[in-house]
Image: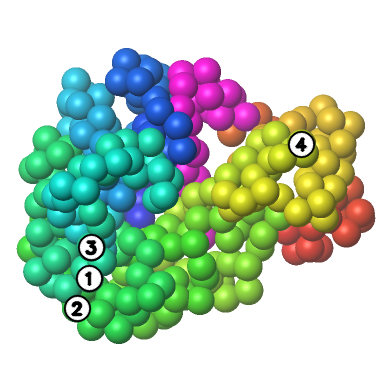
């Protein structure tokens, strides 16, 4: 377990991303969701990440219920603020936002100080907890002014009051995350999909800045939503169908992995975790079997010759992995 930035909040090297048990794209049954979290615990995972956005609160409710049987001091949990959930009577489902749940609530963008506290209070109620360890500003891409002017200071105040242990921001881009690292006193940033075998945009500025400032990085989207887990026609990259060029690149990587007696999944996870700024890699799994596979792949050594062949083939920059 390593600590997040200067906060000392511990996280396991492999973390559990709970969006999937919030019925991401397709339904996951209650029992299966519970067993998936239980298996993550059995595999040694002690860092669990969720958000109100995931299934309109379903992910938080399920995660809180599954973790209730474990001593609170033995795990770290993070949630997010920025999307406040408000009841709505419009009916229908939430598939337009990616979740197979009834549209009982609507998401209201709110990075105000009041919104941050209200959103966190509602999350604590759904989780059944009196505190969380980490709170991220969630996807403030189009709300930068309010996030920096009101949202971040609100998190800083919560940290100083001891309500939360560590604070940060979670996004699918690197530019604003770099600004959080350089211009604020965050402990951690969650970077999704921008430091993978297929996309190393975080390498240029975000990761060096994090090392320099002593800020931890949590990596999400290690498989770029599927392509690096199972490269095949129709596979997705960042939740859209992968282009032929990306598919070809992933298939070439898989062929090299096979030749070196490893797997593309193991290589994808090893790549993310190798950088010194990275404290944890989140994986989103929907079944006990998927959790066990990810834990096995994460623990598997990847031969140095594999990385060298990727570099020689022009599939990886010379400097990677660190």
Q: Earlier in the sequence, mark 2 or mark 4?
A: 2
Mark number displayed over residue 31: none
**Residue 24 x %, y %:** 42, 38
Depth check, mark 3 against mark 2: the one in front is 3
Category of crowding for the residue at label 3, using alpha-carbon neighbours closer than 10 angstroms: few (below 14), some (14–19), many (at least 20): few
Kindly identify which residue carries mark 4: 232
Residue 289 within the segment the image draws in magenta: yes
Q: Residue at x 50, y 45 (%)?
A: 281
Kindly identify which residue carries mark 1: 111
Left or right of residue 321, residue 39 in this image:
left
The one of 184 and 55 positioned closer to us in this rendering: 55
Q: CA–CA distance between discs 4 and 3? A: 37 Å
Kindly identify which residue carries mark 3: 108
Which stretch is magenta?
Answer: 276-297
Q: Secondary structure at mark 2?
A: helix
Q: CA–CA distance between discs 2 and 1? A: 7 Å
Q: Residue at x 10, y 42 (%)?
A: 125
Q: Is residue 264 above or below residue 52?
A: above
Quarter of image, res 93:
top left
Q: Secondary structure at mark 4?
A: loop
Q: Earlier in the sequence, mark 4 or mark 3?
A: 3
Q: Earlier in the sequence, mark 3 or mark 2?
A: 3
Q: CA–CA distance between discs 1 and 4? A: 39 Å
């Amino acid at each position: 377990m390593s600590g997040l930035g200067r906060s000392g909040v511990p996280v396991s090297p492999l973390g559990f991303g709970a969006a999937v048990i919030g019925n991401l794209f397709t339904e996951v049954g209650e029992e299966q969701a519970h067993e998936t979290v239980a298996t993550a615990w059995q595999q040694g995972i002690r860092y669990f990440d969720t958000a109100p956005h995931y299934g309109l609160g379903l992910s938080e409710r399920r995660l809180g219920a599954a973790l209730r049987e474990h001593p609170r001091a033995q795990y770290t949990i993070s949630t997010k603020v920025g999307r406040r959930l408000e009841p709505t009577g419009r009916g229908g489902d939430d598939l337009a936002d990616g979740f197979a749940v009834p549209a009982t609530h609507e998401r209201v963008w709110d990075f105000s100080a009041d919104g941050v506290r209200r959103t966190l209070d509602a999350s604590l109620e759904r989780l059944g907890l009196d505190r969380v360890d980490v709170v991220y500003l969630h996807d403030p891409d189009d709300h930068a002014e309010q996030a920096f002017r009101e949202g971040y200071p609100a998190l800083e105040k919560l940290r100083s009051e001891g309500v939360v242990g560590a604070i940060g921001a979670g996004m699918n881009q690197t530019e604003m995350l770099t600004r959080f690292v350089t211009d604020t006193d965050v402990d951690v940033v969650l970077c999704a999909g921008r430091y993978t075998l297929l996309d190393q945009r975080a390498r240029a500025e975000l990761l060096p800045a994090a090392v320099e400032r002593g800020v931890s990085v949590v990596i999400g989207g290690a498989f770029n939503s599927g392509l690096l887990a199972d490269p095949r026609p129709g596979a997705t990259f960042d939740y859209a169908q992968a282009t032929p060029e990306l598919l070809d690149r992933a298939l070439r990587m898989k062929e090299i992995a096979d030749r070196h007696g490893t797997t593309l999944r193991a290589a994808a996870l090893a790549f993310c975790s190798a950088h010194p700024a990275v404290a944890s890699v989140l994986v989103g799994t929907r079944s006990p079997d998927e959790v066990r596979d990810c834990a096995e792949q994460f623990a598997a050594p990847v031969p140095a010759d594999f990385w060298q062949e990727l570099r020689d083939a022009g599939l990886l920059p010379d400097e990677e992995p660190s």
